[in-house]
Image: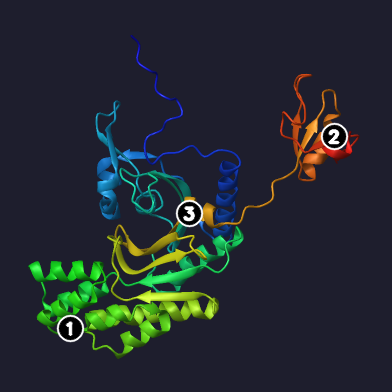
Amino acid sequence: MTEDLPNPALLPSGLADLLPPEAAREAAMVEAMLAVFAGHGYERVKPPLLEFEDSLLAGSGAAVADQTFRLMDPDSHRMMGLRADITPQVARIAATRLAGLPRPLRLSYSGQVLHIHGSQLAPERQVPQAGIELIGVDCAEADAEVALLAIEALAAIGIAAPSLDITLPTMAPALLDAAGVHGDLRRKLARALDRKDAAAVRELAALAGPPAIGLPALLTAAGPADRALTALREAELPPAARAIADNAAAIVAVIRARAPELRITLDPVEFRGLQYHVGVAFTLYGPGTTGELARGGRYRSGEEPATGMTLYLDAVRRAAPVPPRAPRVFIPLGADPAAAAGLRAQGFVTVAALTPADTPQRLRCGHILRGTSAAPIEESV
């Protein structure tokens, strides 16, 4: 008795084939965005899919260790990791291969990453990314540059009017440190902030005392950037937290000067999913219900300050308008190759017949070559 053969189209959960025309559409979007990055001086790098585990998970790479597939290299007999994020790889390149170049260093990239687990909102485990890293400078202008450049890249593929959400993942820890909050109370406060449980934050912050007692006001201040910045200005903050607030205000001011119509929100105490960020963090949301398109912010690239932004191409592709497809022109057997080349130069897609059995319908063509022109099928009969 033989067992049924597995379905060859069945793939592991979280993995999928990208078929025509979406595969070509994604590739075109990547090239359009990378062209925008290149126009601002961001030079392209291409890290490998696999690296030795000890280097891949060093520094900021430690934040994605639990999402990293590992395997034994049969050649060196060392453990390797399959990247779950490209940013730590770019940091390694900057610190080693490009260590001698003047700073700031502007780098761009695109590629696939693989996660052990997806999430309820994003079940995909293979995730295409494109992004930029600005390494070797720590100032409001640098953070503003990466945010604005990501917005420009989205505009280049037709995504208009995204919104920018700014978070301050170091603000809550700075307030808890200043209040001397540790142990169980700190864990409970962190959990309450993570869940946006205003009542629990108010109760626990009262136990912690100043300056943590100001956390409830900052939690409820989340929303439009101007309102949140006003709450930060009026709050009694210790020096470290005040520096974080002033830096956020400076970044917003730079962005506002260059993109006055951009919708900006600010959450002073949000810190979820931003393990390696040491300053402001950014999330770009698409119009309507298209969701999270990009994420980034300030981090440490080895010993250097850095900031960057990663665009999630699956979400970007869903949010971008679908461009019209180039007309497909059927090229009959024996047709003049020069005439077909002329049509391609005009933007047509030419599909040549290879056997007498090939027909325009079979090759999914709406036009046919007549002389040196592309004639719609219905006009050619």
Query: What amino acid is at disc 1?
Result: Ile
Q: Residues within 10 Å of mark 1 (few under 14, many from 20)?
A: many
Q: Specify the amino acid type for callout 2.
A: Leu
Q: Is residue 232 visible?
A: yes
Residue placed furthest toward the front: 1
Helix, strand or loop under label 3: helix
What residue occupies the far right of the structure in this picture?
371
Per the image, label 1 sits on a secondary structure element best described as helix
- Residue at the farthest bottom position: 234
- Name the image quarter holding the C terminus: top right
**Which residue is nearer to you in this view: 11 or 41?**
11
Looking at the image, tell me whether mark 1 or mark 2 is earlier in sequence order: 1
Residue 180, relative to residue 282: is it above or below?
below
Across and down, in percent, residue 279 comes to 32, 70
Q: Earlier in the sequence, mark 3 or mark 1?
A: 1
* Vertical comparison of 11 with 242: above or below: above
The one nearer the camera, 35 or 265, is: 265
Q: Which mark is residue 213?
A: 1
Quickly name the residue at label 3: 315
The mark found on residue 369 in the picture is: 2
* Mark 3 Cα shell of 10 Å, populated few (<14), some (14-19), many (≥20): some
Q: Are marks 2 and 3 in contact (CB under 8 Å)?
A: no
Q: With respect to residue 331, does 188 lie above or below?
A: below
Task: Where is residue 239? Give x, y as percent.
Answer: 23, 83
Question: Mark 3 belongs to which amino acid?
Answer: Ala
Identify which residue is drawn at 25% across, 47% down. Answer: 66
Residue at image x 30%, y 80%? 220
| Image-quadrant location for residue 194 | bottom left
Residue at position x 29%, y 46% in the image? 67
Q: Residue furthest left?
A: 183
**Cα–Cα span, label 1 and label 2:** 76 Å
